[in-house]
Amino acid sequence: MAAKVLTVEAAKAAKIEVVENGKYSQVIHDTVTALRANRRSGTASVKTKATVNGSGAKPWRQKGTGRARAGYKSSPVWVGGGVVFGPHPRDYSKKVAKSVKKLALRKALSERIKSGDVFIVDEFAIKEPKTKQFAAAIALITEEPKTLVVSAAFDKNTYLSARNVQPAQLITASEVNTEQLLNFRKIVITNDGLAQIADRLAK
């Protein structure tokens, strides 16, 4: 499984438009923020003094007991009472334009290419579903275990051999996003995966 570093010239030859200046950092921030926000379930919820299950009776009379006046047992200052300003179900999702997502993907890939962190291989396939074989295949390319492998498609054996290697991840070229390109220390892309990414960025 011969691998070589993907250079800027080779990326351009593969019809990848490389961003060579420092522009478009904001689009990466907006895209990654939206990706993370969209993963939030927004289901956290607490009970207020109005929704706590309990009697509405006054605990004791207003005057004459020597204790502080109290009107209800669900008061937030009491143990078991309601929560003030606690979380309630909400939608955290953010919308990002398709053009912004595409630009962020191009910018992120360009930065990783310029840093020399992207390797190109003809194909990436494991013959048997064994973790040891997957780890050995990654070691032939890079010593960095936190590696993202991108291809147009993977066979079943390759998926099975990679599932127990937590630092590494397999992702198809049609699904890879900006956050993944930035999270992993090294990126391995097959020739067909690179062609598919080029098609995504060209549309």
Image (cartoon, rainbow, N blue to C red):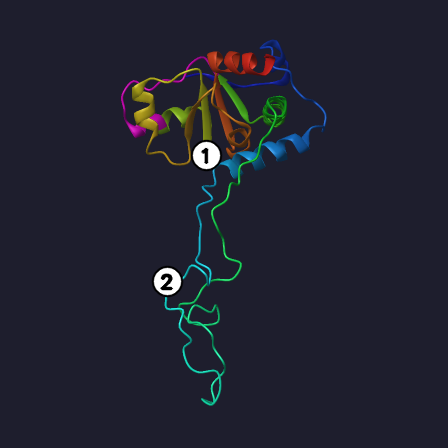
Q: Residue 53 — which label?
A: 2
Amino acid type at image mark 1: Lys
Q: Which residues are magenta?
A: 121-134
Label 2 is placed on what type of residue? Answer: Asn
Q: Is residue 111 magenta?
A: no
- For mark 1, give the secondary structure: loop
Residue 52, relative to residue 194: is it above or below? below
Q: Nearer the viewer, residue 12 or 175?
A: 175
The image position of residue 142, as x and y in percent, is 47, 28
Classify the position of the N terminus by image quarter.
Answer: top left
Judging depth in this view, the residue of 173 and 134 nearest the camera is 173
Q: Nearer the viewer, mark 2 or mark 1?
A: 2
Q: Residues within 10 Å of mark 1 (few under 14, many from 20)?
A: some
Q: Nearer the viewer, residue 39 or 73?
A: 73
The CA distance from mark 2 to mark 1 is 49 Å
Instruction: From the viewer's perspective, tell me whether residue 102 is left or right of residue 41.
Output: right
Q: Quadrant of residue 203?
A: top right
**Which labelled disc corresponds to residue 146?**
1
